Amino acid sequence: MTSIVSRGDMTAGAALPTPSRSRSGDLAKAGLSGLRARPMRATLSALGIAIGIAAMVAVLGISAVSRAGLLAEIHQLGTNLLTAGPGQTLFGDDSELPTEAVGMAGRIPGVTSVSAVGTVPNATVRRTDKIDQEENGGLAVSAARPDLLKTLDGTVRSGAYLDAATSRYPSVVLGAVAAERLGIDRAGQGVYIAGRWFTVVGILDSLRLAPEIDRSALIGWEAAAKLGFDGHPTTLYERSTDATVSSVADVLAATINPQNPDQVKVSRPSDALTAQLAAKSAFNTLFLGLGAVALLVGGVGVANIMVISVLERRQEIGLRRALGATRRQIRLQFLTESVALSLLGGLAGVLLGLTASLTYAAYRGWPLVLPVEALTGGVLAAVAVGAAAGLYPARRAARLTPTQALAM
């Protein structure tokens, strides 16, 4: 005898089947399958992301290593060097430092070394007397004291610096730039200064804190007097202890020229090197903007590829929907593919940018500083761009019904 079971009894006795839910691992596999199926398209799409991320990481990385290198150089050179030079009078005329300026500055408590140079008027340095006097190559002839190199903490590349003996005779020491422009590569050669031949007794290494010395031909104070030098220094160099730099800077002008301290300009050369960091940051902003543009273009490319992928894979979408995949699962599948595509490009860009930064640091001999913020930011930026680029294609794929997709 056949029993009849009511619909209500069936509902109460047996639970309805649970809809299929893909696990996170399944969604990741489905999302990555599109990349594996079209490797060339994926590579070209990720290239735009890689270029943008590489540019941004390289800019920040090179900035980090150059900053570390410059700070290390400043620390090595010291920040306790001050310079003083003539300013202008009340009527706008050029003033001059007293001839006793060096001795007066040396009496300031905390000062450890003082020296000076003075411009020799109407004097030019030339390789031979056959060269026109007006062709000076931007080089200056300056009187220098024997203790200048000690105060500047400089070194001699070739020969020797001026001493008490050579300062009285036609001897000259060339700065690094001056020697290069004159074609002098060793001591013992001659140059023509103010109608006389001078023997090159030394060539200096470059002085970062005194670049004006690099472009100068230095002769002794006594020898310069024979060429019309009046003994007034044009630049005074002073070193003090680290603890007294600020206090010395406050009184240096008044000590050198008590009657007109406002006509003395005091500066710290290391501040100019530090200012380079601020100047470089302005260029970094520009290059970061260019990198962001490249990243945006790469994101547009990823979005375009994902839209094409949705159109090509309609039957796959329809089949997955017919087997129970929800709209959310389809959306996450294509979002996963887009983010994975951008992430691969981002990782490649980070490696390229990091390699460029470390290579540049090694070439310049600077500390190898890893810009952790740039590396992390590059990866996160790639993920964000991938999510934004894949949002529209993913929503478009999720809106397709099984009948619409399979009908294509």
Image (cartoon, rainbow, N blue to C red):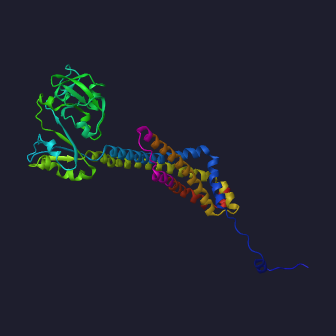
Residue lying at 62% horizontally and 59% vertically, measured from the top left? 330
Decide if residue 91 is on the left or right side of residue 165: left
The number of callouts visible is 0
Q: Could you say which is closer to the camera, residue 274 or residue 324?
A: 274
Quadrant in which the C terminus is drawn? bottom right
Q: Could you say which is closer to the camera, residue 283 or residue 128?
A: 128
Furthest-top residue in this view = 130
Q: Give percent across and percent down for residue 292.
A: 44, 50
Residue 333 placement: quadrant: bottom right
Q: Give percent across and percent down for residue 386.
A: 53, 54
Decide if residue 19 is on the left or right side of residue 368: right
Q: Residue 142: within the magenta?
A: no
Q: Could you say which is closer to the camera, residue 171 or residue 228?
A: 171
Residue lying at 26% horizontally and 26% vertically, measured from the top left? 182
Residue 149 placement: quadrant: top left
Q: With respect to residue 154, does 80 lie above or below?
A: below
The magenta stretch is: 360-380
Q: Could you say which is closer to the camera, residue 152 or residue 62?
A: 152
Q: Give percent across and percent down for residue 304.
A: 54, 50
Which SS type dominates the magenta stretch? Answer: helix
Residue lying at 32% horizontally and 49% vertically, measured from the top left? 278
Decide if residue 374 is on the left or right side of residue 145: right
Quadrant in which the N terminus is drawn? bottom right
Q: Give percent across and percent down for residue 6.
A: 80, 80
Q: Residue 362: within the magenta?
A: yes
Asked if residue 408 shows in the view, the reply is no
Asked if residue 47 shows in the view, the reply is yes
Q: With respect to residue 93, does 137 lie above or below?
A: above
